[in-house]
Amino acid sequence: MLLIKKLLKYYLSMIAIFFIGRTLLFIIYFDNFKDNNPEYWLTFLYGLRMDTISASIFLIIPTLLLTLSPKIFAKFVNIILKYYFLLLLSILIYIENATFPFIAQYDVRPNYLFVEYLEYPKEVFSMIIADYKLAISISFSMIALFIYLYLKNYQEGVLKVFELLYLKRIALFIPIALLVFIGIRSSFAHRPANNSDAMYSSNRMLNEITKNSIYSIGSAIYVNKKHGSKKLVAQYGKMEISKALQRVRKRLAIENSSDELPFTREEKTSFKTSDSKNLVIFIQESMGYQFVEAVGGEAGITPHLNRLSQEGILFKNLYSNGTRSIRGLAGSVAGNFSIPGKGVLKRNKSQSDFFTISSLLEPFGYQTLFLYGGESRFDNMKGWFRGNGFDKIIDEPHFKNPIFKGTWGACDEDLANKANETFKNLYAKNQKFAAVMFSTSNHAPFDFPDKKIELVQGVDKKSVKNAIKYADYAIGKFIDDARKEPYYKDTIFVILADHNVRVYGDDMVPISMFQIPGLILGDSVKPLVYEKITTQPDVLATALDLIGLDLTYPIMGKSVFNDEKKELSLMQFHTSYALRVKDTIAIIRPNKKALTFKYLDKHLVQIKSDIELEKDALAFIVSLDYIYNEKLYR
């Protein structure tokens, strides 16, 4: 039948695009799984299932038009489908091309991130144009060639289909629609197939290759926009909230039996003083441990951090909340772990009355500030900080005649100079302050001023290593300049990263790539190398301990000077969570059985399930979602 042949032709065209993309990914990343996954060829079988789901969804409109439209609309339907498939196949070609740099950057297929940042076109497109000129050229050249060949060879299109009697076409609707439905569902089980069915292997990259990019994007958007957090959490499992909160409190050693404010408790300072310290938290964009010699990274990239690490509290085993700045900011400023779905900086219920250091320290007379060299509206930082009590936002418009302005705003040296001047003036007025600084220079396309650092040999000037070396230069300058000012002796300085520069690896969750540097400095801070596992909330709790106040807060971490502090971290990797207690790790994923691993030589080795640890991992997810939705993180 001509009608069926036409639909089959469209189906095979889409499958061919998906197959070519998957095959190239398979070749490029073959070394990642060839030795420990003998069934790697199944990626094409499971992948065909994912591709069929996507192709079948796109066949709904053609099926309806070709079977149910009267002949009088033949020419109209022909035009509609001509440009429908021109646009659709062009988009698929683009997304398959975009998959390669996206995986290179994020180590996963395109997901919600692929479209989320489109609300910031200036920064995003500047970065794309600067970093991906070749990829963009190849992609649009392929699309242009496809459009040319498509239009050249498109003749009568679907007009001959309408020569079939209308009643026969209507009769074909039910069997064809049934086939399309089966293709979309791709399962005869109780639930339809979804992305979890692509995760057949213990090798994460092989699972990513098996997925389908357009389906992953669509699924992520659908879940985030339509289902809400309750549906998100339900994918991980169910647990009574009272039991979940009890488990989390036990893991974190938080003594609080109240479900009204589940994690809020009083923490006595270990450094009681009549005159509390100021607090400055300098958060570094994308600074991974592997670039910092002091915490086990490469030598020669961060000489200033290495020098300063001998003068304060160095966190040698510190792990970030997640892989996004908004996760790191929440962990470092509010002391909470990553909630499922969007981060709290961008979610409605956390735009006010959400705990931060501002709400904590304001009653003690502190003025709170957020300083950022770029446009603070990015990632809704300005709205979140302002809505949660920060008194002043100093961002790009406040930097007059900057030393250097790049894609993301004023450089880190400008930020350091602005901060030092601001803190000096506040101190002169006897005004206590707590400030959060957020750097910009170590972010693609890695813009920074010339003649400030000796470039790292063997890499391009505009590379992550040189950007980090420049960020390190700005850190050193900021601390050295601060030491010349009176406010230094009365201030605690925190330097830590929001997340690693790029979280990648073959493990289900690449634990080692969550490791970041962290350091606390101050005139009264005694040098210490802290070797045990810590989190961003732990660093925040430690810094607050050092300012010398007894405080009541819900921070999900403990000061390293508190004997009850646990060796624990919770890491979010896209939709997966890893709860680490010492070297045992429970990983929980949507619609999949939880698994337990040992962390040996910076890799995961699966072991017999630790049921209690796996339940605790679920408890964290359930509790984090609950305290957000009920606005109990106060």
Image (tube, rainbow, N blue to C red):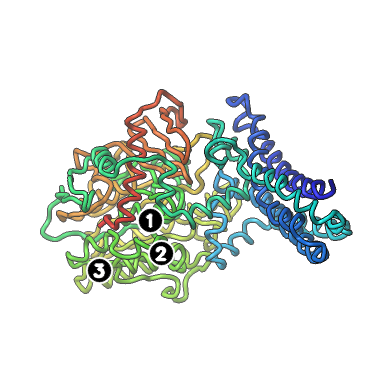
- Viewer-proximal residue, 290 or 109? 109
Of labels 3 and 1, earlier in sequence is 1
| Residue 538 rendering spot, x and y as whole percentages | 29, 46
Q: Position of residue 82 (x, y in %)?
A: 79, 60
For the residue carrying disc 2, how many other residues have a C-alpha within 10 Å: few (<14), some (14-19), or many (20+)? some
Screen quadrant of the C terminus? bottom left
Amino acid type indicated by mark 1: Leu
* Mark pair 3, 2: CA separation: 18 Å
- The location of residue 627, given as percent across then percent down, is 30, 52
Asked if 347 appears above or below 564 in the picture, the reply is: below
| Residue that numbered label 3 is attached to | 367
**Does residue 255 appear in the picture of this structure?**
yes
Asked whether the beta carbons under mark 3 and mark 1 sit within 8 Å of each other, the answer is: no
- Left or right: 271 with respect to 313? left
Tag 1 residue: 329
- Which residue in the protein does label 2 denote? 381
Q: Secondary structure at mark 2?
A: helix
Q: Amino acid under label 2?
A: Met
Q: Compared to 124, does 216 lie above or below? A: above
